[in-house]
Structures are given as C-alpha cells and as structure tokens.
Image (cartoon, coloured by chain):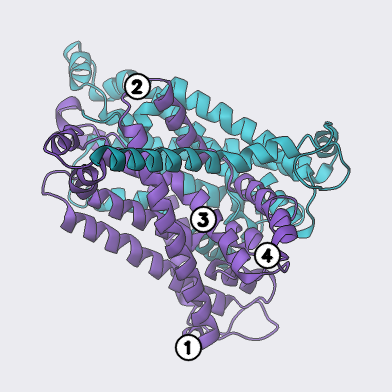
Amino acid sequence: MAVATATTGFERGSVRGPLRLSLLLLALPAFFVITVFFLGPLVMLALESVRTFVPGRVTSDPTFTLGNYEKLLHPAFIHFFLDTFRLSFIAVIISLVLSYAIAYFVARRRSGAVRSFYVALLIGMLFVSGMVRVYGLSLSLGTVGLFGLLREVLGLERNNILFLEANVIIGIVHYTTPVMALTLLGTLQHIDHRLESAAQVLGATRARAFMDTTLALSVPGMTSAFALGYAMAISAFTIPVFLGNGIVVAVTMLIYQRFSEIPNYPFGSAIAVSLLATSMVVVLAGLWLVRRLSPAVSQA
Amino acid sequence: MKRIIDNIWLCLFGFVVVATTLFLLAPLLMVLVMSFDGRSFVGRFPPPSLSLQWYAKFFSDDYFLDGLWTSITLGLSTAAAATVLGTGAALFLDRTRFRGRHFLIALFLSPLIVPHIVLGFGLLVLLRHAGLDNVFLSLLIGHVVVTIPYAIRIVLTSLQGLKANLVEAAMALGATEYRAIWDVVLPLSRTGVVAASVVALAVSMDEVTMSVFLIDPFTYTLSTALFATMRDSFNLVIAAASVLLMGITCMAVLLLDRLVGLDRIAGQGDR
C-alpha cells in the first residue's frame, strides 16, 4: 500500500477548539459501532466460554467453569487444532513460493500490459467471492474434474484422506496466494534490482545473485506475508467445509458445529477464543519479527 | 557452465510464474464453462453441449432471487453506512493529533484480522442476549463492522494525499476551517469515498462465514444460499450464480481502476 509521506500531506498540526469537537462528533458513530459490535461480541465470547453448558438448552448456566477449556485439551480436540495448523503451514509455505515468483515477476515491470494484467488479476482475485472460488476448486478437483480422472487411473477411494487433505491445501494456496503476492509486491518494488545485476557482473550465477541480494533483503516482507497468509489459513471456513468433504475437520468447522449441529455455546465460545488467541499470536509474532528483521528505516 | 545454470534457473522461474497464473485462473474458467453445460446432470469436464438452462433455472428460483435481493439491499445499506461512518472517523483521524491516536487507528482496523467465524459466533451470542431478532439488522450490523476498516483506510489514505496549500488557499480567501473541510477537503476526497463504498459493497456481497450465524430460513443472502445449496446438492445453478457474482466483481474492479487506479492500490514502487 502506498503511504503518503508527511511532506505531501496537510500541515499536520492538530486542529483545536470547536472544530476539533465537531470532528470528534463525526468519529463517534464509528467508534460506537466498533466498540459495541466488535469488542462487545469478543467480550461476550470470553464470558460465555467460562459459563456452564446445560444440555438441551440454548441459554447456559452462569456458574463459572474452566471445563470448556479443559475439554479442548482432550487428545481428540488437540488433534483438530494440530491438523489445522499443519495443513495451514504446508499450504502457506507453498503460497509463499508461488506468490514470491509472481510478485518478483511483476515487480520487474514498471509499466505495460503484463504488469496491468497481473495487478488486475491479483486485486480481482481478492474481490472474487470466496464461495465462487471454493465452488470452482471443488468442480476442478472433485469427481467431475481432476479427482474423477485420478480415481480412474489410480483407483483411489472416494474419501481418501491424503487426497482430501491435498484438496484443502490447494484451496488454501488459492486463497492466500493473491494477498501474499500483493504484500510481497510492495516489498520487492522497493528493492533495487541493480544489486542483482551487480552481483552477476561480479560472477555470481543468476540464482546466487538473487539469493544473496533480493531474497536476503526481502526476508521482512516474506515474514509479514507468511504471518498474514497463516492467519488467513487458520481462519478459513468454506475451504475445509467444501474441499475436506467432512473428513478433514478444521477448527473453524468445530465452532460452526457447536452452533448448527450440536448447540453448545459455551464450548463453541471456548474454541472461538482459542482460535482468536492463536491468530493474534501469529499476527503479533509476525509484526515483531518484521520489526526485528528490518533495517531501521524501511518500515511503512 | 554458468550459462547453463542460469538458463535452468530462468526456465524454472518462468514455469512457476506460468503455472501459478493458470492455477489462479483455472477454477474460475472451469465455473464459467460449466455454467453453460447442456447436460441435465453434473458430468465430467468438458461439457459436450452448451445451453443457458442453468441461468434460466437461477432466474426462476425464488430461493436464489430472494437471496440476491437481500444481498443487494444489504450490500447497498452496508456500503452507505460504512462509508458515512468511516469518512467521519477518517476526517477526525486526519485533522487531529492526540495521544493514543495510533491506538485508535489500530482499534478501527482490527476487525480485519479477527476471523469472521469468531466475529459471527460472538455477534450471535451478543445479539441473542440483547434480544435483537431482526435478521436484516443483525446482518447489517455485522457487515458494517467488517467493512468500516476498509472505508477508514481508503478515505484516510485519500485525505492524506491532499495538498496542504489547498486548505491554506481556501482559508486565505476567507473560508473558515469548517468551510475549508466541507467545500475543499470532502469534494477532493470523493474518489476515495466512492472507492470505499465500492469496496464495502463488494466485501458485503461476498461475506458468508459470519453471515451463516445471523441468517434464518426467511432472510438470507445469496452467498449463504449458495453455501446451503452446495452442502445439500451439487448442481450447476451454483455455477450460473457464480458467473453472475464474478460479473459483479469485474465491474467493481473496473470501477476501482477508473476511480483510483489499480496500480495505486498495489503501490508503484520506487517513490
């Protein structure tokens, strides 16, 4: 994202007096909505997660309990979490390679049709409905597409777990690659490509020159792309639902089940709080790492 | 020797770029082609004959049309509300400096990083406790929460791009600060404001993960209708609906390109 520098903007002095007050009034509605309907639900989840579940009733008993979190420590549930983290990790590593290649390819072009095409493709992919993408993937990979062919050739079982896991990984790669490519594009455009030429002139192979200059300088960008992609991957919901065929179960699906199939709000809330905490840790760790890795100035 | 390694490296790189491009596009093309399938069942790709039957089915199915209508009204209401609220917040954040300003910006943007499934479940619990049972209003609240960050970020960026001397000129000519903001700043940031509402509309039309917690059998969006249909059966009406959604997406992207330029969104590089 392009960030305007202080010199091109307004005189950045703060306005005072009645104008400041009326601007404050303009901001209040947004503040109200975010506080009540964004922070509110998160607080409610935290409260609900320590209440006692009453079987057969939608309202829970206000008696304090940590039982819902204790239940999460059961091996079966740990397993779901680990599965989600493992599949997401594999997928985002693949996305990192693919998105890096695309971003590198686009960053070398300052103008022209190829660049416009890719920028439109990447931004367009962000806007294409998630349902459409998942549907397209399940058509391409499912019985009428690739899987149908593979099944004929290899004689795979309908619910082959490795195949379904691969499906989910492919879905996540498709979901995260455009966003990560745009993040990396921002980084790579600011790296001087003449460094690479210089390394080549001095005798390095293309690969070596790339790794020692551009790749080394883009580690902070890669870190933030990875953190962003990973946070997206573990929060993905429609991808595991439709590409995992009910056999691959992601954490997000557990939450939905506690609402739609076996209503248990306290336990659902405990899972949701755990998922939120995990994704916060990923994002914050990413930010922290980026700050550690970046040379002092090149923030923004 | 060095040349051979270099050529292998270039080939490998070219292969990854081409393969990734095809991989990103293939599922969308698949949907496009299959939506014109002439068969009455979901058969192997490619379709042996073409027809518009799935589009006809979509437009004669009240279930989908009701969803489409809700999506459109919800999307427009969300875009209007998020843009008005977001512009108000952006004006305040742009023109004032105070301790905790960065914290406030982070708070305003934080719905972007919270998983929608968590937000959906939380909103459900909150709204049940509050006793709100109007589905459209619940959906509107949820959609406004997830689109406000986009609106604030886009409008704030466009405000920060304005030249300081325009406001100074207005005030030198006798305008009060109010008039300078109302007559100069807001009109100049209108592309940002319009871009914000386009993005909010697109995000709202897409949203499904949070919405599935808030709908009921009578009020639902097109995306959640697709969600329910895909779970039950696998027919190509969904492909036709998907192509229509992709058409809307293309229009939104073209509109954004005309308004702000896609390259500005992606960042131009050395600047």
Q: CA distance from mark 1 to mark 4?
A: 28 Å
Q: Give the numbered dot on residue A70.
A: 1
Viewer-nearest of labels 3 and 1? 3
- Mark 2 lies on residue: A111
Horizontal and vertical percent position of residue B54 = 82, 38
Q: Amino acid at mark 1?
A: Glu
Q: Earlier in the sequence, mark 4 or mark 2?
A: 2
Q: Quadrant of the C terminus of chain B?
A: top left
Q: Amino acid at mark 3?
A: Ile
* Mark 1: few/some/many CA within 10 Å (<14, 14-19, 20+): few
Viewer-nearest of labels 1 and 2? 2
- Mark 4 lies on residue: A245
* Badge 1 and badge 2 both on one subunit: yes
CB atoms of marks 3 and 1 within 8 Å? no
Element under label 2? loop
Residue A291, above or below B41: below
Extreme residue toward the right, this view: B40
- Is residue B131 visible in the rendered image? The answer is no
Chain letter of mark 1 equals: A
Q: Amino acid at mark 2?
A: Ser
- Mark 3 lies on residue: A172
Q: Earlier in the sequence, mark 3 or mark 1?
A: 1
* Mark 2: few/some/many CA within 10 Å (<14, 14-19, 20+): few
Answer with left or right where residue A282 lies relative to residue B43. Answer: left
CB atoms of marks 4 and 3 within 8 Å? no
Query: What tint does the image give chain B?
Result: cyan
